[in-house]
Each structure stands twice: as structure tokens, then as C-alpha cells.
Amino acid sequence: MALKPVIGLAGGIGSGKTTVARLLREAGAAVVDSDELNLAQLHHPDVRRELQSWWGNSILDGSGELDRKRIAEIIFRDPNDRRRLERLVHPRIARERERLIERHQCDPQVRAIVLDTPLLVESNLDERCDAVIFVEADEEVRRRRVVERRGWSTEEWARREKSQNALDKKKSRADYVVVNNSSDLAQLRADVHALFERVILEASSKRQRGPDD
Ligand code: ATP
């Protein structure tokens, strides 16, 4: 069975990576969502036990569930706590991601595997991909989307935007660009579906030629 391409999505905050991932899923891709993997690992009993041993019951809410807001506060305040959490959770997420990719590779319904991950280039996951699509939207459009739709404050936007690598670096790493400035979802759908066919075709001819040709 021929291997299916692994496609990574890069782009600024609010550019529309998750929206593009959804449209790729419609076209026959399976999506591996890093936010979902992260959430599942945080709630894993082994991880939860470890976090409780570090930070006590303060990380539980009134009904004994993990309080993610509280954890976010802890790691925002202390970079050492952030690194400690990442050292625990990241290898587990990476293993789970690989397990899902393998599973999708064996599923005849799946035409490609998409990695929807907030920091594809920063976490070097672009190296795991056969193709990277950069989702491009102007800063003003991106800011408006997250402020209006997610209720972020302007300060929250600025803080998160600053914490990411420069967008031109991410764009230069990408093999394809899809522009998502308008709110015309029908146009975006048509663009994404056409691009998907192109990526599949080019990935398969690249494989036939060999990686160094
Ligand atoms: P993040 O970097 O924060 O994960 P993202 O790049 O995954 O964001 P999305 O979540 O896909 O971006 O989009 C941000 C918001 O903008 C969402 O509420 C989404 O519904 C909306 N949005 C994205 N693209 C469009 C579009 N073409 N028209 C209208 N709304 C859009």
C-alpha cells in the first residue's frame, strides 16, 4: 500500500488553520489535532496523578476534575513549571500522534493525514510532514476573528502573537499557501479542495521520483 502524505498546517493565530483542517477532512483527509491530544493526555490518570503530586489539590475544581485554567495560571507564572509539564506531556503526545498516523495510514478511507497543531514549525513537526500548507490572513483580519469570535482581549491577542515565531519564516518553510482573508467560506472550500488534490498528486509523483531528484 502506498504511503499517504502527511500534511502540516502553519499560519498565524486566527489565520484559519482549524477551518482549513475541517475542509481537508471533507475532502478525505484524517486530521490529527494536537489540542485534542494535549487535552486527552492532561486527563490521563497517570498524568493527573503526577500533576497532583507536584501542585496538590489546588489543580482540581469543586467537583474533583482537573482545572485547566488553574494549570494555565501555574505555568504562565513560572517557566520551570511550564518546562516540567512539557517534559511530562510532550513525549506522550508525540507517541499518540505517531500511533494515530500509523492507524490512518492503514485506513483505506483516508487519503492523507493532516497535522493541525498550533506551533508546527516551532516544534519541528514540519520535518515530519511531506508537505506544509501555510494559511495566510492579514494581521487585522486575524485579530478581528479572535477578538470577536473567541472574546480575547487586545492584550491577550498581543501577548500570544508575540510568543510565536515570525510569520515570514513559517511561510518560507511552507510548500503551499492558501489565502484566507475573506469570510467567503464557499470560496475557501473550493480553494482548499483544489489544493488538496494538487498536494496528493505532487506528493505521489515526488515519491515515485525519490526524495533527492
Ligand atoms: P489558532 O491559531 O488560534 O488555533 P486557527 O488558525 O486554527 O486559530 P481558526 O480557529 O480556524 O484559526 O479560525 C479562527 C476563527 O475565525 C474561528 O472562529 C473561525 O470560525 C473563524 N474563521 C476562520 N476562517 C474564516 C472565514 N474564511 N470566514 C469567516 N470566519 C472564519
Image: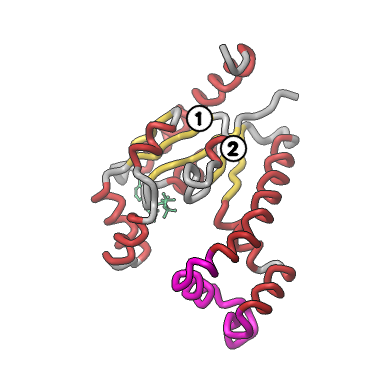
Q: Disc 2 versus disc 1: distance between alpha carbons?
A: 9 Å
Mark 2 lies on residue? 29
Of 106 and 168, the residue lying toward us: 168
Q: Residue at x 55, y 41 (%)?
A: 125
Please identify the quadrant where the N terminus is shown: top right
Residue count near mark 2 (Cα–Cα under 10 Å), binned few <14, some 14–19, many ≥20: many
Q: Is residue 68 magenta?
A: yes
Q: Provide residue 63's location: percent of width, then percent of height.
A: 62, 86
Q: Which residue is mark 1?
A: 196
- The residue drawn where x is 29% and y is 55% is 143
Relative image position of residue 89 (x, y in whole percent): 64, 60
Q: Considering depth in this image, is 19 or 213 the residue closer to the camera? A: 213
- In the image, residue 87 lies at what x, y percent? 62, 59
Residues drawn in magenta: 55-82
Residue 131's disc is none
Q: Earlier in the sequence, mark 2 or mark 1?
A: 2
User: Residue 20 lies in what quarter of the image?
Assistant: top left
Determine whether the residue tagged by mark 2 lies in a helix, strand or loop: strand
Q: Is residue 29 left or right of residue 75?
A: right
Three-letter amino acid code of the residue under disc 1: Phe
Q: Where is residue 201 drawn, in percent x and y?
A: 55, 20
Dots 2, 1 in contact, CB < 8 A: yes
Under tag 1, what secondary structure?
A: helix
Name the residue type under label 2: Ala
Magenta span includes 199: no
Query: Does residue 45 sit above or below 188 in this rendering?
Result: below
Residue that sits furthest to the front in the current view: 80
Picture residue at 57% right of the left edge, 29% below the top: 130
The extreme bottom residue here reads 62
Compared with 41, 193 (above or below) is: above
Report whether 26 appears left or right of 191.
right
- Chief SS of the magenta region: helix
